[in-house]
Image (cartoon, rainbow, N blue to C red):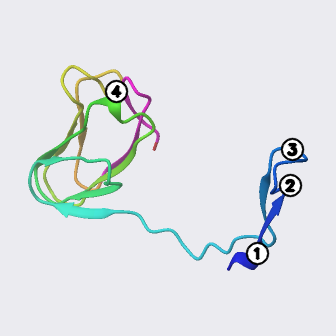
């Protein structure tokens, strides 16, 4: 409630006002977007975990507009999953990345290209 928020110098006369929490916030848990697909899929800004259950390609969006985006992609099927950056962009310095059955990759965008980080 509002009783847990403290405003210091709220009238602005003595300096810039600051807002402080009177108590530590209680974070109950974290939920992320998870989807399963068995067909080619175009990743969006709302995706995080992408589970692929068939031979398919996950197409990544243009890196220039997705700086800082992270995807966790796992092959939960028996075929090969291909991760394909947009246009001529690269992932780990190559055109695509393949995931065999059971493999996964956590990838991040630096605004110019994609990298695996796990």
Task: Give the dominant element type of the magenta stretch: helix, strand or loop.
Answer: strand
Cα–Cα span, label 2 and label 3 = 6 Å
Name the N-terminal-most of marks 2 and 3. Answer: 2
Is 47 above or below relative to 105?
Answer: below
For residue 4, the mark is: 1
Q: CA distance from mark 1 to mark 2?
A: 16 Å
What whole-number distance in Å separates the C-alpha atoms at marks 1 and 4? 40 Å
Horizontally, residue 70 falls left or right of residue 42, namely: right
Q: Residue at x 31, y 54 (%)?
A: 47
- Are the two marked residues, 1 and 2, in contact with CB atoms closer than 8 angstroms? no
Residue 75 occupies quadrant? bottom left
Magenta stretch encompasses residue 113 = yes
Q: Cβ–Cβ below 8 Å for labels 2 and 3? A: yes
Secondary structure beneath dot 2 equals loop
* Residue with the mark numbered 3: 15
Around disc 2, counting alpha carbons within 10 Å, would you say few (fewer than 14), some (14 to 19), or many (20 or more)?
A: few
């Amino acid at each position: 409630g509002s009783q847990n928020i403290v405003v210091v110098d709220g009238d602005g006369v003595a300096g810039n006002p600051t807002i402080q929490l009177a108590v530590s916030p209680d974070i109950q848990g974290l939920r992320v977007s998870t989807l399963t697909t068995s067909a080619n899929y175009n990743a969006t800004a709302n995706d995080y975990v992408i589970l692929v259950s068939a031979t398919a390609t996950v197409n990544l969006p243009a890196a220039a507009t997705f700086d800082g985006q992270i995807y966790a992609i796992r092959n939960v099927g028996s075929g090969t999953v291909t991760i394909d950056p947009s246009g001529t962009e690269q992932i780990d310095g190559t055109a695509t990345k393949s995931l065999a059955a059971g493999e996964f990759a956590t990838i991040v965008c630096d605004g110019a290209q994609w990298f695996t980080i796990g």
